[in-house]
Amino acid sequence: MERRAIHRLLSAAAAAAITTSVLADGTLVPLDVHECALHTLNRLAFGPRPGEVDRVVGMGVTNWIEQQLHPNRIGDAAVEAKLAAFPTLHMSSAELVAQFEVPLLEARKQVKAERAADNGGGDAAPGADAARIGELIPPEKRPRRILEEMTQARLVRAVSSERQLNEVMVDFWMNHFNVDARKGLDRIFIASFERDVVRPRIWGRFEDLLLATAKSPAMLVYLDNARSAADAEHRPPAFGRNRAAAAGKGPTGLNENYARELLELHTLGVDGGYTQTDVTELARVLTGWSVALPRTADAPRAMNRAGRPGRFAAPEPDPGTFFFRERLHDVGTKTVLGHKFGGNGGVEEGEAAIRMLAHHPATARHLAYELCRRLVADDPPPGLVERVAARFLATNGDLTETVRAVVLSPEFFDPRTYRAKVKSPFEYAVSAVRAAGGSTDGQGLGREVADMGEPLYLCQPPTGYADTSDAWVNSGALLARLNFALALTSGRIPGTEVDGRALPLAGNARAIEAGAEKLVGANVSADTVRTITQRLGASPDADDLAASTELLAGLLLGSPEFQRR
Amino acid sequence: MSGCDRRFFLKSTGLALVAGGFLPRVFVRMASASEIGASRRVLVAIFQRGAVDGLNVLVPYGESAYYAARPTIAVPRPGSSGRAALDLDGFFGLHPSLEELVPYFRDRSAAFVHAVGSPDATRSHFDAQDFMESGTPGVRTTRDGFLARALEGTNVRTPSALRAVAISPQMPRILAGSSGAVAMRNLQGFGLRGVGDRDGTAKTFEAMYDDAVAGTLRATARESFDALRAVQGANPSGLPPENGAVYPRSPLGNALRQIAQLIKSGVGLEVAFTDVGGWDTHAGEGGGEGQLANRLRDFGAAIAAFARDLGSRMSDVTLVTLSEFGRTVRENGNRGTDHGHANVMLLLGGGVRGGKVYGRWPGLAAASLYEGRDLAVTTDFRDVFAEILARRMGVADFSKVFPGFACDPARRLGAIA
């Protein structure tokens, strides 16, 4: 639909503020302007803060969306100031390696040496080595600190940033290009991955985002491309064929992991029309794409082949940066999806292959489907997916235009999509803090999100967390949500505060109903209000207004209505 | 409702259109305590994360290549001085730290499967655990776990709210899915932690969710509150160990103690899962004594306490252990072992035809090794689980439990009666 038409639709809704929903006979009643604003804040932000629905109505829903599509034009000084509390957020991979990884390597060496001196290196009591390393390196100097600060920063931003749609899309793309920070050195590289690879590119061209992830140390380690090598007969002649393999050093063969996920998850999609041969050939194209690794201080910064000058003897770049290991690259001819690569196309042939994939029609459909599933419905309307895919192709993969095609579509404002999604653990936790006018340093809040089943940066499979509710709603997780709501409103989450003025005052049913509308947004069912009223009336704490208010807010934020967005 | 019944039910009532095939819990009657009774069979799975060195757990002492490959960390032959292997069958001996398990092997309630594992070649803990728990080696995109899928096909007609429990902070991959599994750190902590009248608060939430629009949330809320009630009603955490069992005060000991409590309280448990780490012995592994010996002492003591605690109830309980892969035959330069291939599994309890080491032993001769370095896999771990699930839990159709894997009963070991 044209933008003008959307404007007309929204102003018509504003003029005739009518009731919502799908009537019993199946008639669709358009959303009124307040519902449009609430819906927009639930989908394109992490839910409204107190008074925000009115503010968005005041400035116009489409104006708000337009503003959010250009996050760099939105000031965010308060959040930037808060992020200064997290030093690792601002350090390069090389600095993080030097500060967190090298000392750990050296401590391990030292402990090993100590043990060898003590008893011949054999038997250590269980945990003794870990305890000794613990003495040498206090917890705040462990790589784990990076993960903790990143988790905190993500939550601070999601709760407090004015660039809400940007944070929603960071969540989407970090999940699309999932990396598990537990895999090897990704405990270090994950920081640069979000900051330097993903965040700067999510409003530009998909091709640039895809290529940057392909060259990111985080992805190269996570999906093993860093250890993928050409078979001996396809190694560059200058390095002596079979030599590396014969010496038993370094990677000795092809690893298809990344090539497969690049096709299946990052670009074409599982039904995107590629074969096992395409996977293998693409893996060959990408051989040599690797990472420069950290060393302990006393280890030499090795030359590729010590003592031999020339282009193959270039020293490795800083640890934690992309490094094309030419001696591992496959110099044979390869064919991916009918495109020929090689003889020796070097690093450029991989770049060409990735650009080709970025613009493939199957990639357009796959990304359009994923975006519509995140922003519109678990099972998005096929017509919308087709239009969004067409927009992606027409704009050469412009991600701002592609997202705009989703969020300014009639399907986005269709009454059937209103509150049709269940919030993910992250969305739920953040939206509750926002609804209660709260603020957070992210520490306790991060543990709550993990308790609900989806810890940030720790999703094991490359699929990322599922984007449909059936995957994340389970018994333990739902109890965790209810416990979270009660803990939040009674001030029991360390580092997170709510604003008492945002909470509804306990009182009679009318007061509760009004308070519920205010906190949850809208459309709290009569059943829910009745149930809560009974509970508050029957409570032995009924006379304690503060306790009743906390309980009321906890019940409302734990309500089935608030689980939806 | 068995998988087959359920499909028929959906088709015949036209409910197949409900929310992408999701079956609202309202159509599955929850079992009452009396219907569950005491005779429900239970599968208990323990994952040894980090790849335990199976060659030092169940030692092929009859093979000289074992001693040649491990000059400093081999477990001595039975009868040697010091902490030597405990002979089981004239060829294999058990690590001396697992002494407490020997009586169960002798009375034929315990068996081992050697040279068992996943056919996938990966030596990444990360991938191998993932492949094992998803039950689809080599396929990374499987979202649910094979034990969750197996639960869809058990012969239990009235599933309990506590049919599948993981003693674990998060839902483990092996139980992820729509089987209604519950993950809990511990039994005492499973519930609402609000202040004041917690029961009242729980009832309020339950009423709110009962009134909610049908769908995932309402169905899950029912499962949650049913599970909560089941835990509170049975009060399993109050049950003391029986028969003089003493659990080690370790994470595994605590987890197994709680699983035993769930079994004894008759809440309808079918599958329990827990995991234990510390097996990644790249350096200073030790032989009869040392790092691995200490880990195994806790492991054996916890399992022995579990079996003793349950006593005759063990006839309904089948315990099985698994680990993502084995370790190199040859010890490395740090008196440890690196990531290998095949490993060993323990089977204990109900239905186990014990007193035997199952599986074809491929040997440790250089030519028999996988990729020239590791014990070869001669039994797929899925065949072991298929046998347990088929013989004990009534699972008949394995096409969904292990998609892409032909579960041929002819390949089964005959380890389960």
Image: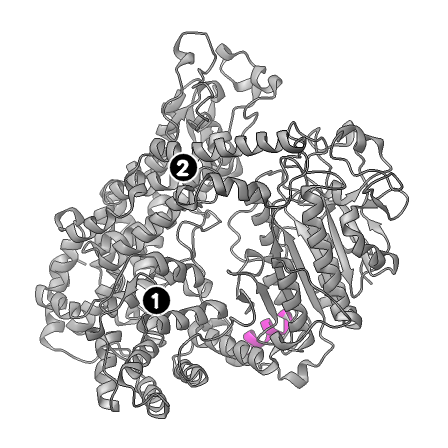
Q: How many marks?
A: 2
SS type, badge 1: loop
The single residue placed furthest to the front in the displayed view is: A118
Mark 1: amino acid: Lys
Give the residue at mark 1.
A421
Residue A262 visible in this rendered orientation of the protein: no
Mark 2: amino acid: Phe
Which portion, as a residue range, is magenta? B3-14
* Residue at 72%, 59% in the rendered image: B303
The secondary structure that dominates the magenta segment is helix
Label 1 lies in what chain?
Answer: A
Give the residue at mark 2.
A100
For the N terminus of chain B, give its image quadrant: bottom right
From what the image shows, is residue B142 above or below residue A434? above
Residue A142's image quarter? top left
For the C terminus of chain B, give its image quadrant: bottom right
In the displayed structure image, the side of residue A323 where residue A60 appears, left or right: left
Query: Mark 1 or mark 2, which has the lower sequence index?
Result: 2
Residue A254's image quarter? top right
